[in-house]
Amino acid sequence: MQISSRRRPQSAASPLQGMDSSASIPFHVRIEQELRRMMALPEFRKGALLPDELTLANRFGVSRGTVRVAFTRLVEQRLLERKAGVGTRVRPQPAESGIGAWRSFSREMARKKIQVENFRQQYEIAVASEVVAGALHIKPGTKIWRLDRVRGWDGRPVLHTRSWFHPRLGLTGREDFSKPLYEVIQLETGVIVTNAREEFTAVAASAAMARLLAVKTGEPLLLRSHMVSDKGGRPVEFAQINYVSSRFALTLEMRRENHGP
């Protein structure tokens, strides 16, 4: 199929003038660039319908087919969703977290304009299982403080975190973990965490976890096992975090340090 575009008369100011107007960039790419700018606007991020193809074709002075190509590319990238008889809107994207930003989840989300809500918090003494004891290098059966939290946003739970703390910290149970966890630990104990080791596993939601996260039993979850230590390599916290994978995505960034052969 041949896609054509039409230019406005030379006397008229082109609506594409403010965009990247390099002659080497196809019109549909330039329309896509403009659509991306529109998609970032609050009204469209909140679900408002984007203008239709004909409206945009008239606005930008191109053919309707050119606009359709730009729309199609964004739909294929899962950035837009189209429904026959309804229109086109921005596709809701799962919130992302870089695994390197483990020091404060709530602050990381705040930078993304997401207000984290606490749906449940329980802080109590628990007995260390063999898995927990092995991670913290203590004896199984040792009594230690455990923190359970269910957090999310937009009225929906997104993750459940269960943290166990090394008895060396001397926690008392009066710590206020409504604030960033590692800041509280440093303030209350003087211990500064510097290292984290991560493991990821795909799991199915148990009946208990399904109730906490408001999902169906058996729904896929991402389990993140999180081991935190101080600058001396001594364990501070072992955590297991279950994420609702349809509402959240973790990203991993890697950088090549050695540029030699």
Image (cartoon, rainbow, N blue to C red):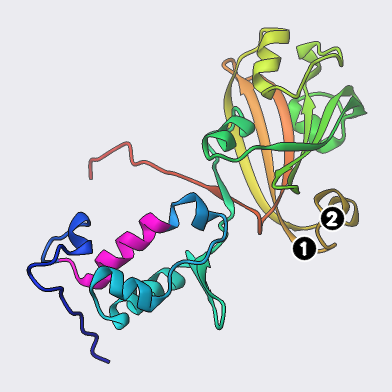
The numbered mark, 2 or 1, whose residue comes first in the sequence reads: 2
- State the residue lying farthest toward the front: 11
Residue 13, position as x, y percentages in the image: 15, 62
- State the residue lying farthest toward the bottom: 1
Q: Disc 2 vs disc 1: Cβ atoms closer than 8 Å?
A: yes
Is 198 situated above or below 206? above
Q: Characterize the magenta stretch by its predominant secondary structure.
A: helix
Left or right: residue 146 versus residue 75 is: right
- Residue on which disc 1 sits: 219
Query: Which picture quadrant has residue 203?
Result: bottom right
- Residue on which disc 2 sits: 210
Query: Which numbered marker is on residue 129?
Result: none
Q: Give the camera-side residue of 80 and 45.
A: 45
Q: CA distance from mark 2 to mark 1?
A: 8 Å
Left or right: residue 22 versus residue 232 is: left
Residue 59, position as x, y percentages in the image: 29, 69
Hey, what amino acid is under mark 1?
Glu
- Mark 2, residues whose alpha carbon is within 10 Å: few (<14), some, or many (≥20)? some
Hey, what amino acid is under mark 2?
Ala
Residues drawn in magenta: 25-38
Write the residue at 27% across / 92% down. Answer: 1
- State the residue lying farthest toward the left: 10
Query: Which picture quadrant has residue 114?
Result: top right
